[in-house]
Image: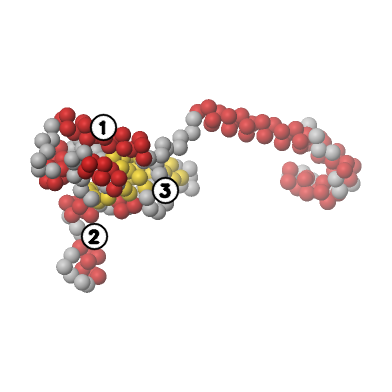
Amino acid sequence: MSSKQPRKQRLAHYTAPYHRRHREMSSPIDKGLRERQLSRGFMYPRAMPVKKGDRVMIVRGEGKSKSATAVSLVDRKARKVYVEGFTYFKSDGTELQRPIDASNLVIINPDWSDIRRRKVLNRINESVDWTDEVISDLEAAEDEYEAENVEPSEEKDEGSEEEEVTEEETDDSKKEEVSEETDYSKMSVAELKDVLKEKGLPVSGKKADLIERLQGDSK
């Protein structure tokens, strides 16, 4: 943008064509991955436009983590990226994917399946003949680097979920047993009236009447 006027800069930002938004939605490639591939004779760009299928890490903002996840959607119009497993719940319980800025991501394992994207490698690695074997070897090295340097994502096992459910059920049953074994005779009239109010029962009468009313309700 050549203009220094903020109004013209904002106008250019919101009316930018998609090919310009594509360049603006770039994420840096992990420095360690670039150095490892450079030692093997492959030069990577410092950053490139993020693409669906890339393995990325959230390094800034909400959701910051040391585990990698896959990009599920790139919204060029809104300039937002959506990754797998990064969601939020609306007030009605609906689960939605949370949008992220491309600048908050680091590409840890690029996806080279798109032939047009390989032109990025062709421009900076003119001496390399990009055959299918070379590409497969390149991707294997990326997978190896991710396995060595990225923490595995935390996923709950079905068994642990079942254990949590059983623990909750046992806690509920214990609470019910405690409520059934409550000795109302040791409680004061004020405490008995509070319990009756919580259960929506009348609070009038003597202490014996209140105790009888609570015992009848528990049965």
- Number of residue marks: 3
Query: Can you tell which quarter of the image residue 122 is in?
Result: top left
Mark 1 Cα-neighbour bin, 10 Å: few <14, some 14–19, many ≥20: few
Residue type (three-letter) at the residue carrying disc 1: Ala
Residue type (three-letter) at the residue carrying disc 2: Tyr
> Of label 3 and label 1, which has the lower sequence position?
3
> Which residue appears at 24% of the width and 60% of the height?
14
> Of label 2 and label 3, which has the lower sequence position?
2
Query: Residue 119 in the image: x percent, y percent?
Result: 13, 42
Residue 80 lies left or right of residue 87; in this view the side is left
> Which residue appears at 42% of the width and 37% of the height?
153
Element under label 3?
A: loop
| Separation of marks 3 and 1 at Cα, in angstroms | 27 Å
Closer to the camera, 173 or 160? 160
Check the picture and name the quadrant holding the C terminus: top right
Residue at image mark 2: 14
Closer to the camera, 52 or 15? 52
Is the residue 16 above or below the residue 120 in the image? Answer: below
Residue at image mark 3: 63
Mark 2 Cα-neighbour bin, 10 Å: few <14, some 14–19, many ≥20: few
Residue at image mark 1: 140
Query: Residue 74 in the image: x percent, y percent?
Result: 27, 45
Element under label 1?
A: helix
Mark 2 vs mark 1, foreground winner is 1
The furthest residue to the bottom: 5
| Residue 107 visible, this angle | no
Residue type (three-letter) at the residue carrying disc 3: Gly
Query: Can you tell which quarter of the image residue 145 is in?
Result: top left
Residues at marks 2 and 3 touching, judged by CB atoms closer than 8 Å: no
Mark 3 Cα-neighbour bin, 10 Å: few <14, some 14–19, many ≥20: some
User: Residue 129: which disc?
Assistant: none
Query: Residue 103 in the image: x percent, y percent?
Result: 31, 53
